[in-house]
Image (cartoon, rainbow, N blue to C red):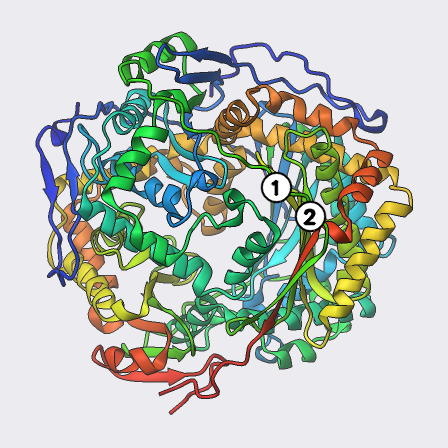
């Protein structure tokens, strides 16, 4: 196996509690813009004979307008249906049949496409991505067909799952701004309303080189690769910049509550979300550490107190997911049989109160610090994880190097920081509570 | 550019189209630049040693990153060996080992592990013959992780209060899983394929859980967690010499027992093909499983069935292209099989919206029939084989993944050069061999159909496929 060609560059992360932690090499990359506005990030790593290629487009469901929810994601499906030089489904077929893997994903904030391929198939990956950015084939037949696939995806993931509708209800209640209020998957009615004109206009506006980042990580040569990217992408014309989305959310002044009856659920569940600032905020790292302390692993406060000691729930989860716009600090728990949602909610509130008032222990801070360090090491193992992160950091923060600074930033968070953000954001007036309770199904189940 | 791509190839719909919707066949224009070389990848081989207590040691040294992972495999400690009235015993023994030792509480174990961002898990399936203890940590914490591992492996306490807590959580899970259509389908299919063989176990009952005591857990641990026939595999920032030293200092107390090599056997031959429907009122989809018994891992047909299955149910295989891409019946569909030291299972599964249950099942069965009846065209066969062989390049990112291949070799007694010659064996599979495997394993009278959905809407449709048995979500027969 080939070794790293480059000597490791010392990025000295703070060694936890004096334990001799080896310095971990940082990720080196080039960051270039083609004349048509396409941003290209390349990170060489010759430790395995493969590479990942990611194209991140600056469009997600937050760019959708009323009456067209689900469109960004429906469009993602269209991207596999062929382009001028690539037949229907030829793209995924060629990737998988050459030992690669690929997919696309859509979130509220972006749409991205990736390929991981054996090192000798760089041209294949770049050709396929460039051809669809240049010349996507848009037909009524493809649109109808993918509309069906997406509606099936919705049935599978939302309509046929216990708590499926809960996810949608939370965002609808917590957000007032349409950008984040509606779900990525969209409504059945809106999916049915999507027209050929919508698809064509969306493609022209958002799938332009100046609205995308290409990131490549792995067993490639930077200079050669950049030349290949030029060859395949440089001829794709730039388009006018899409209109910016107003993400502002009016301040919430009172608690919001909703109870949903769910015929597919058997256990009651509470979802509690609090408004937090976008991930670019200086408070984001402390909020991330707060989520770790409350709910990461079995040493977390929620687990030890609510799952193990009080036995009110099989799992209580807290998260502060990365968002470009106003975010949510989300807490989710399912009540054990025979336990009430009221007791469960009281227990969760008790732990939130404790984090605000009683000191955070040093080992809890160290846990967050080591965990960030280990995540960074894991990213160094996966070319895909690095490529996605470089692309998103470029798009969200105009700072691909954030991948190298996260562990340091987390290491700088201390106990008082965590308490401060808990006191500032985990407040009753800023929260939304959705209770999901089982609805007894119709008594007759058979024929 | 590869010659097979030079022409415009249109892969036509293979079964009789039901044609309510526009078709979107796959079209290969052949213009994309594909490198004709299959990247020759040589998997690095682990170094091995055998210790006097019977433990087999495998080390895949890889200094790229400062972390180390390990897995201990303990044959005989899996749910395969549970008594019928105590299904779950092995699995819960494994889970409880982590819930406290003679000197460490469960909470302390969690705190120590998570402060190091290390992992440690003891697990055993309900049906397989082995238990595993696995973990990973940054190099600087690995010594401490092994201290903890030894304690969990050798000195678990099985405290009654921990068992009570665990039991409460487990019972909640037993309720919750019955809302999940895939669980219901898996439970039924395994029962039908494996009968009373341990491989058919998917979930214990509440009665099973109540029959298990802390003493039974401790006894299972004492008699089954022996190193006599076990192996430990390390990957990452460690050498064989370092691993041996670590094992001597941390696991020296793990003494050889007198356990005979645990014996496993094949399940009974599969029963007559039938259709099983589990009523799930309110379901907007039908979950469809078609399955049967497969083979042992050492079966000479293994490569041929791997290739045939790749053509049928692999990513972008025929089922996906036809039922998802062409017909839009489903979000996902595929097929897979397991093969261990006894006959495993083959399974194709999908979820379709209720009103297309009939054509979706018909098309699924037609695709299977096509592989039985017609040889796979050469281009498609070559593509499937290249897909299998080419994916090795990607797996080299993760040393643990590579090591897993050698763990399989050890478990099933595969030849030392098995993985070196595997690509050649796959490449050598002919269309006739793939078809013969399809005929043998996917014969109509072996295929069991399981559906979960709204019985009022799909029972009559399913009855057309054969003898129908109807059950409720608790697994009880209904009329």
Q: Is residue B458 left or right of residue A319?
A: left
Are the two marked residues, 2 and 1, in contact with CB atoms closer than 8 angstroms?
A: yes
Front position in the image: B110 or B433: B110
Residue at image position (40%, 23%) is A241
Front position in the image: A119 or B445: A119
Residue A165 horizontal/vertical position (percent): 51, 62
> Which numbered dot is residue A252?
2
Residue extending farthest to the bottom is B479
Count neighbours of disc 2 (C-alpha within 10 A) and say few if under 14, some if 14 to 19, many if 20 or more.
Answer: some
Q: Is residue B333 visible?
A: no
Chain at numbered mark 1: A
Mark 1: secondary structure:
loop
Residue B164: quarter of image: bottom right
Residue A291 horizontal/vertical position (percent): 72, 44
Q: Is residue A360 visible?
A: yes
Residue extending farthest to the top is A223
Residue B112 horizontal/vertical position (percent): 80, 43
Count neighbours of disc 1 (C-alpha within 10 A) and say few if under 14, some if 14 to 19, many if 20 or more.
Answer: some
Which quarter shows the C terminus of chain A?
bottom left
Mark 2: secondary structure:
loop
Residue at image position (76%, 42%) is A290
Residue at image position (40%, 56%) is A187
**Vertical placement of A184 versus A8: above or below?**
below
Front position in the image: B227 or A116: A116
Front position in the image: A326 or B119: A326
Residue at image position (16%, 26%) is B31
Residue pointed to by mark 1: A249
Residue B7: quarter of image: top left
Q: Is residue B360 left or right of residue B206?
A: left
How many numbered circles are shown? 2
């Amino acid at each position: 196996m080939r070794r790293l060609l480059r000597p490791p560059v010392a990025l000295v992360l703070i060694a936890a509690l004096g334990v001799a932690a080896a310095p971990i090499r940082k990720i080196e990359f080039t960051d270039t813009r083609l004349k048509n506005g396409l941003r290209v990030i390349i990170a060489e790593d010759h430790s395995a004979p493969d590479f990942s290629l990611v194209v991140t487009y600056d469009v997600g469901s937050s760019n959708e307008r009323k009456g067209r929810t689900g469109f960004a994601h429906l469009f993602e499906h269209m991207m596999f249906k062929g382009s001028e030089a690539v037949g229907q489904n030829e793209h995924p077929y060629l990737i998988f049949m050459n030992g690669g893997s690929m997919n696309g994903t859509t979130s509220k904030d972006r749409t991205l496409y990736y390929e991981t391929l054996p090192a000798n198939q760089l041209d294949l990956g770049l050709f396929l991505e460039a051809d669809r950015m240049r010349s996507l084939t848009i037909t009524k037949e493809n649109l109808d067909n993918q509309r069906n696939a997406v509606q099936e995806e919705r049935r599978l993931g939302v309509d046929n799952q216990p708590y499926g509708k809960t996810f949608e209800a939370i965002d609808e209640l917590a957000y007032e701004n349409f950008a984040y209020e509606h779900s990525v998957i969209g409504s059945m009615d809106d999916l049915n309303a999507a027209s050929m004109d919508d698809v064509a206009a969306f493609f022209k506006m958002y799938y332009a080189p100046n609205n995308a980042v290409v990131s490549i990580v792995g067993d490639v040569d930077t200079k050669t690769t950049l030349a290949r990217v030029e060859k395949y992408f440089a001829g794709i014309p730039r388009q006018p910049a899409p209109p910016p989305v107003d993400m502002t959310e009016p301040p919430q002044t009172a608690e919001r509550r909703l109870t949903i009856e769910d015929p597919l659920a058997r256990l009651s569940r509470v979802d509690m979300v609090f408004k937090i600032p976008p991930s670019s905020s200086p408070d984001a790292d402390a909020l991330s550490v707060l989520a770790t302390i409350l709910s990461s692993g079995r040493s977390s406060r929620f687990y030890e107190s609510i799952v193990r000691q009080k036995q009110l729930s099989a799992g209580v989860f807290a998260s502060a997911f990365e968002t470009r716009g106003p975010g949510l600090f989300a807490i989710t728990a399912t009540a054990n049989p025979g336990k009430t949602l009221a007791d469960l909610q009281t227990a969760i509130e008790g732990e939130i109160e404790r984090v605000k008032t009683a000191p955070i222990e040093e080992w809890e801070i160290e846990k967050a610090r080591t965990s960030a360090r280990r995540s960074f090491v894991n990213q160094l193992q996966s070319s895909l994880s690095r490529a996605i992160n470089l692309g998103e950091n470029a798009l969200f923060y105009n700072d691909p190097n954030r991948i190298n600074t996260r562990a340091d930033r987390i290491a700088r968070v201390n106990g008082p920081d965590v308490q401060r953000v808990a006191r500032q954001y985990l407040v009753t007036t800023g929260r939304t509570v959705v209770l999901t309770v089982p609805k007894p199904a119709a008594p007759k189940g058979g024929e | 550019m590869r010659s097979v791509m030079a022409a415009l190839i249109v892969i036509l719909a293979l079964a009789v189209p039901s044609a309510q919707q526009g078709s979107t066949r796959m079209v290969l224009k052949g213009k994309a630049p594909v490198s004709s070389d299959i990247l020759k990848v040589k998997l690095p081989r682990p170094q091995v040693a055998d210790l006097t207590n019977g433990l087999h040691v495998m080390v895949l040294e890889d200094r790229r990153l400062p972390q180390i992972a390990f897995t201990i495999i303990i044959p005989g400690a899996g749910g395969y060996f549970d008594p019928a009235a105590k299904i779950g015993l092995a699995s819960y023994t494994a889970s409880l080992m982590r819930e406290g030792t003679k000197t460490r509480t469960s909470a302390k174990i969690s705190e120590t592990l998570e402060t190091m961002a290390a992992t440690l898990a003891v697990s055993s399936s309900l049906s397989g013959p082995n238990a595993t203890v696995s973990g990973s940590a940054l190099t600087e914490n690995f010594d401490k992780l092994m201290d903890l591992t030894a304690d969990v492996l050798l000195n678990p306490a099985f405290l009654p209060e921990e068992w009570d807590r665990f039991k409460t959580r487990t019972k909640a899970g037993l309720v919750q899983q019955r809302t999940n259509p895939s669980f219901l389908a898996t439970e039924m299919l395994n029962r039908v394929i494996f009968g009373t063989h341990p491989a058919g176990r998917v979930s214990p009952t509440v009665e099973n859980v109540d029959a298990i005591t802390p003493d039974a857990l401790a006894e299972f641990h004492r008699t089954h967690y022996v190193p006599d026939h076990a192996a430990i595999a390390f990957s990452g920032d460690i050498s064989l010499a370092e691993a041996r030293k670590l094992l001597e200092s941390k696991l020296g107390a793990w003494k050889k027992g007198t356990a005979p090599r645990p014996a496993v056997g094949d399940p009974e031959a599969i029963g007559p093909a039938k259709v099983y429907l589990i009523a799930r009122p309110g379901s907007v989809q039908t979950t469809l499983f078609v399955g049967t018994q497969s083979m042992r891992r050492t079966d000479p047909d293994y490569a041929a069935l791997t290739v045939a299955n790749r053509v049928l149910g692999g990513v972008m295989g025929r089922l996906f292209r036809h039922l998802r891409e062409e017909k839009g019946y489903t979000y996902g569909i595929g097929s897979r099989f397991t093969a261990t030291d006894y006959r495993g299972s083959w399974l194709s599964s999908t979820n379709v919206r209720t009103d297309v249950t009939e054509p979706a099942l018909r098309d699924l069965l037609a695709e299977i029939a096509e592989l039985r009846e017609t040889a796979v065209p050469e281009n498609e066969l070559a593509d499937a084989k290249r897909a299998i062989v080419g994916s090795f390049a990607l797996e080299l990112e993760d040393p643990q993944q590579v090591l897993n291949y050698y763990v399989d070799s050890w478990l099933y007694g595969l030849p030392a050069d098995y993985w070196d010659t595997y690509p050649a064996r796959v490449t050598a599979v002919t269309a006739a061999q793939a078809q013969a495997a399809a005929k043998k394993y996917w014969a109509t009278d072996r295929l069991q159909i399981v559906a979960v959905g709204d019985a009022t809407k799909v029972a009559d449709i399913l009855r057309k496929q054969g003898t129908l048995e109807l059950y409720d979500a608790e697994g009880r027969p209904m009329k």
